[in-house]
Image (cartoon, grey):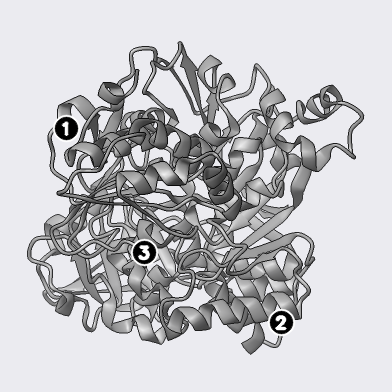
Amino acid sequence: MKNFKGNVLFLDRSDINTDEIIPAKYLTEITKEALKPNLLEDLVLPGFSKEDTRDKAVIVTRENFGCGSSREHAPWALEVNGINVVIAENFARIFRQNMYNCGMFAIELPKEKIDYLFANYAGKDVSMEIDVDQNTITINADGKSETIDFKVGEFDKTLVKEGGWVGYADKNY
Amino acid sequence: MGKTIAEKIFDAHRVEEPFPDTHVLKLDRVFCHEITTPIAITDLMARGMDRVFDPTKIKAVIDHVTPAKDSKTAEQGKILRDWAKRHEIKDFFDIGKNGVCHAIFPEKGFVRPGYTVIMGDSHTCTHGAFGAFAAGIGTTDLEVGILKGVCAFHFPKTIKIVLNGELKPGVYAKDLILFIIKELTVNGATNMVIEFTGPVVDAMSMESRMTLCNMAIEAGGTCGICYPDMVTVDYLWKFIKDEFATKEDALKEYSKWVSDDDAEYERICEYDVSSLEPMVTVGYKPDQVKTVKEMAGTRVDQIYIGSCTNGRIEDLRIAASVLKGKKISDDVRAIVSPATPAIYSLALKEGLIEIFQDAGFCVTNPTCGACLGMSNGVLAEGEVCASTTNRNFNGRMGKGGMVHLMSPATAAATAITGTITNSDIYQA
């Protein structure tokens, strides 16, 4: 399994698309590692700088994250930067499936929980840890910690535990 | 309770349901291009699993950057080319024979009603125009598709769009789909199939239906679907004439891929589109749409006619009919990319290429290039493009560039004036 623990990057916007996560001009790369410097390069978000992605493991954002292209370069660009968890109100279908297919987490939380996370934690030094067996997110900030639940389908969880879809499919089909 | 066409296709292709709402489907087609496939190929090789499930069901094309523009894109083409050769994938379309994937694969008759199709490309939803379930997927799903011929999906609910009335002259499928995306919003159809039905769709050519289905993903849709009918049969006839005694027999067979009257829908949206105006996008999301009249006079720097949305022969005919005998404005440059070599040849034969060139257009080879800012028409910072493509994301056609999506007719009229222009002034 991948690492699901670390610092949190808050991106307070809906509809962040795959072209913003990794622009098409980098799709000529044939290794995942080559995408590392260009994560979120074209993101339009006041106050955001690419430096903000450094030493992060989790992204918390709003609605429809990962809309647009089918490029798996988007999850890969996150992965090679150490970010294996994105928490949002909802995701574009292909991006969401790509995350789980890579053994990464695309966690959906209800709007009120996302609002709560932004209201209480955005702008602070926050870390989160996902407990894969318990379906919980433990949030650490200001020397305190709290735990919230999330829902994940059995298939998605299996992919996370198996480290992705290729290994699972090869065994089963 | 009846079933939707997507349910029927799922039922006919389900291998198993290993977990609740996880449907592993058998695939009829796995389409590949040189951007998303090479990493799947190299990963399979690294795993010691460099195999393909069925070389006759896999079709591949070099289309995004072609001919190669640099060493990296040359390498991507080479990986795909070598792989196709190694596995005896006969339907591989290399430079000279290649076109935009969602134009060339239907043109070759590779998609049939009731099929399951995947491709590592979000606009794979285009092929639903034939009454197929066709979904864009990522490289890992593609890798498993290539290796095992299966793909897993959650069950898609369906939104049914019923289009009544008759489109006004100068209003096309592109205007309609921009209007529908505005209504649904960019994630209004996420995890869902969009069925396009009604008299307006019945009266459409396959090309127009492909334009509609192509942009289902821009509302978040998994697939756009049109019901197969005699228009579908006529389009496919040269490929299926040995399978059926008559066209009526083919229609009868394909009619099983139509939703039942009592099928359950997530939502049914009915519109009378008789008064619909030509539409254009205004911002960086495809649901930010206004009428061309509202946007009239907006300056542009470049016009682009092409892509899997609007680079087919019907699109070139419409654009040429507006451009005939006219010159493009001195303040703009204009590019047209016929989507396949066959479309290019036909356009040449019909005199359309001459009309484009006389008007001042640059005619390129078939490629996706400009649409996603990879080659053949990238924008400079601050430039604006009037484009018949499908995405207006910030920087999509070049960093700092702005894109207005529109129909080929509107793009042609815009080329003449240099500002966003309704084509009606040039159409008798």
Whether residue A149 is visible, yes or no, is no
Q: Picture quarter containing residue B299?
A: top left
- Mark 2 and mark 3 lie on one chain; the one further toward the N terminus is 2
Q: Mark 1: which secondary structure?
A: helix
Q: Which residue is mark 1?
A: B295
Residue extending farthest to the left is A47
**Same chain check for tags 2 and 3:** yes
Number of other residues with Cα within 10 Å of mark 1, as a class: few under 14, some 14 to 19, many 20 or more? some
Q: Quadrant of the C terminus of chain A?
A: bottom right
- Mark 1 and mark 2 lie on one chain; the one further toward the N terminus is 2
**Left or right: B66 with respect to A65?**
right
Please provide percent x and percent y for residue B425: 25, 22
Circles 3, 1 touching at the beta carbon (< 8 Å): no
Chain for numbered disc 2: B
A112 or B278: which is nearer to us?
A: B278
- Mark 3 and mark 1 lie on one chain; the one further toward the N terminus is 1
Circles 1, 2 touching at the beta carbon (< 8 Å): no
Q: CA distance from mark 3 to mark 1?
A: 27 Å
Circles 2, 3 touching at the beta carbon (< 8 Å): no
B335 or A118: which is nearer to us?
A: B335
In the picture, the disc for residue B50 is 2
Q: Where B419 falls versus A129 (above or below)? A: above
**Left or right: B44 with respect to B242?**
left
Chain for numbered disc 1: B
